[in-house]
Image (cartoon, helix red, strand yellow):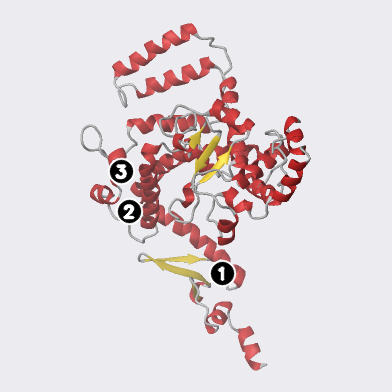
């Protein structure tokens, strides 16, 4: 009882100390407040000595720390570069990554992570060393640091993204801005305004003049008041193709983005592919998917002209991020709010398993269990009759193809009996294949 009364007489901070709880802030009795010492200076936080008071003091200290971090020497340089390369990262997320820029995009992510690690340190380096970047991020160095003169302002407050990325940043800002009039005339003027701003700075004055002159021919030819939403609508026609592939071939968005011409066999109406996510696994099968009539029709209408990939976004890059973004914005319209994009392939997996219990493993194209390997006999890349049948039933159920022919397996004894009464010939004459 005495111990309890003693604890009640103690301050809240003293009770925590007695319990062995380490506090980030100390209680300063002369001023009756909390205090914190940092970089040679003491900060006083005027809140009560209680749990609620301590939490309020911690919140105030967090705000002070954030302000001090911004005032640290060299913090503005590091944050300036973080802001610029975050623009690059956002561009890749919004418009996709061209195959030739994958290593650059990867190193941009790594560079941003490195900056974050630096910014949590108490003292910041006085410069972002070009040699360090060249050694650790060589592709990023070539893309963003070395220019036609052999050097840039990288590592200083004056550094800006190269000309190629100025265009991309403008494009990103245009897409992120509030809704603009969707007329040809509006966007021609917006483009010319950007050319004027950049003339003599990022592009030569002669180049700016040439762009204006060439655009005049287009202005004289086109209907300036025409609405351009029809272009967007035409682009949206691609998404039914992507979604039906997710159902027909159990694709993830990355499989659509990575689908190559070598995987597509139009003449046979098939896609033969090994999951990109599983290419390093020896047990990952190469699956041959029979395409439904509707799938084949949509693929032919949607495929692009990229030398390597079957599908591209409107910028000519890969479609993975654009597909995820579209799904997030539109799934509620179809009564699928809250459903992830892989809900489609999982639905197909469930339906196929209802046709044949173990077939979902083959359908998903993932590493096969021993049971599935024994049950379904096929060589990698060759058609699997069980999967063809399962897909045919799934497609017919959803109205994407004609229902498969029903077959009955006859025993040798039954065939002999049919032959005896010449019933076999009569069945064939009736159009029934034996």
Mark 1 element type: helix
Q: Looking at the picture, how far across and down is residue 346, in whole percent?
A: 64, 49
- The residue nearer to you, when weighing 163 against 6, is 163
Query: Marks 1 and 2, how far apart in space?
Result: 30 Å
- Left or right: 266 with respect to 293? left
Please name which of the two marks, 3 or 1, marks the residue nearer to the observer: 3
Q: Is residue 237 above or below residue 37?
A: above
Residue 54, numbered circle: 1
Q: Quadrant of the C terminus?
A: top right
Q: Quadrant of residue 323?
A: top right
Query: Marks 3 and 1, how far apart in space?
Result: 48 Å
What's the residue at 59%, 33% (across, down)?
Answer: 241
Q: Is residue 382 visible?
A: yes
* Disc 3 crowd, CA 10 A, few/some/many (<14, 14-19, 20+): many
Residue topped by disc 3:
139
Mark 3 element type: helix
Q: Quadrant of residue 372?
A: bottom right
What's the residue at 47%, 47% (across, down)?
Answer: 276
Q: Looking at the picture, how far across and down is residue 319, in whole percent?
A: 50, 36
Residue 349, numbered circle: none
What's the residue at 54%, 42% (across, down)?
Answer: 288
Q: Who comes first in sequence, dot 1 or dot 2? A: 1
Q: Is residue 340 visible?
A: no
What's the residue at 40%, 48% (across, down)?
Answer: 109
Residue topped by disc 2:
73
- The residue nearer to you, when weighing 355 against 334, is 355
- The residue nearer to you, when weighing 365 against 105, is 365
Q: Looking at the picture, how far across and down is residue 262, in whole percent?
A: 44, 36
Q: Looking at the picture, how far across and down is residue 428, in whole percent?
A: 72, 33
Mark 2 element type: loop
Q: Who comes first in sequence, dot 3 or dot 2? A: 2
């Amino acid at each position: 009882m005495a111990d309890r009364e003693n604890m009640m007489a103690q301050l809240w901070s003293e009770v925590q100390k007695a319990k062995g709880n380490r506090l980030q802030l100390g209680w300063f009795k002369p001023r009756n407040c909390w205090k914190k010492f940092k970089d040679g200076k003491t900060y006083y936080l005027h809140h009560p000595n209680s749990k609620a008071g301590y939490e309020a003091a911690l919140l105030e200290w967090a705000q002070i720390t954030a302000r001090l971090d911004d005032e640290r020497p060299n913090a503005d340089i590091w944050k300036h570069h973080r802001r610029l390369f975050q623009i690059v990262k956002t561009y890749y997320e919004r418009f996709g990554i061209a195959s030739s820029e994958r290593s650059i995009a990867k190193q941009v992510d790594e560079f941003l992570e490195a900056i974050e690690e630096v910014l949590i340190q108490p003292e910041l380096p006085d410069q972002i060393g070009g040699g360090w970047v060249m050694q650790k991020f060589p592709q990023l160095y070539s893309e963003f640091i070395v220019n036609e003169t052999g050097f840039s302002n990288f590592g200083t407050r004056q550094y800006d993204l190269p000309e190629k990325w100025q265009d991309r940043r403008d494009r990103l800002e245009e897409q992120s801005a509030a809704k603009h009039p969707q007329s040809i005339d509006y966007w021609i003027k917006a483009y010319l305004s950007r050319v004027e701003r950049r003339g003599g700075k990022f592009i030569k004055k002669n180049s700016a003049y040439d762009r204006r002159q060439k655009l005049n021919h287009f202005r004289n030819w086109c209907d300036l008041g025409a609405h351009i939403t029809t272009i967007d609508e035409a682009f949206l026609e691609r998404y039914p193709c992507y979604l039906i592939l997710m159902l027909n071939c159990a694709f993830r968005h990355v499989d659509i983005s990575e689908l190559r011409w070598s995987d597509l066999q139009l003449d046979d109406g098939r896609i033969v592919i090994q999951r990109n996510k599983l290419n390093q696994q020896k047990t990952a099968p190469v699956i041959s998917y029979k395409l439904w009539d509707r799938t084949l029709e949509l693929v032919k209408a949607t495929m692009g002209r990229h030398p390597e990939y079957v599908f591209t976004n409107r910028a000519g890059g890969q479609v993975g991020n654009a597909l995820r973004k579209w799904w997030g914005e539109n799934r509620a319209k179809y009564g699928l709010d809250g459903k992830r994009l892989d809900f489609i392939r999982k639905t197909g997996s469930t339906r196929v398993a209802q046709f044949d219990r173990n077939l979902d493993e083959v359908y998903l194209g993932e590493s096969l269990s021993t049971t599935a390997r024994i049950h379904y006999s096929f060589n990698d890349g060759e058609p699997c009759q069980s999967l063809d049948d399962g897909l045919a039933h799934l497609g017919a159920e959803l109205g994407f193809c004609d229902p498969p022919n029903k077959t009955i397996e006859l025993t040798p004894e039954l065939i002999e009996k049919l032959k005896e009464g010449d019933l076999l010939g009569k069945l064939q004459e009736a159009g029934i294949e034996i």
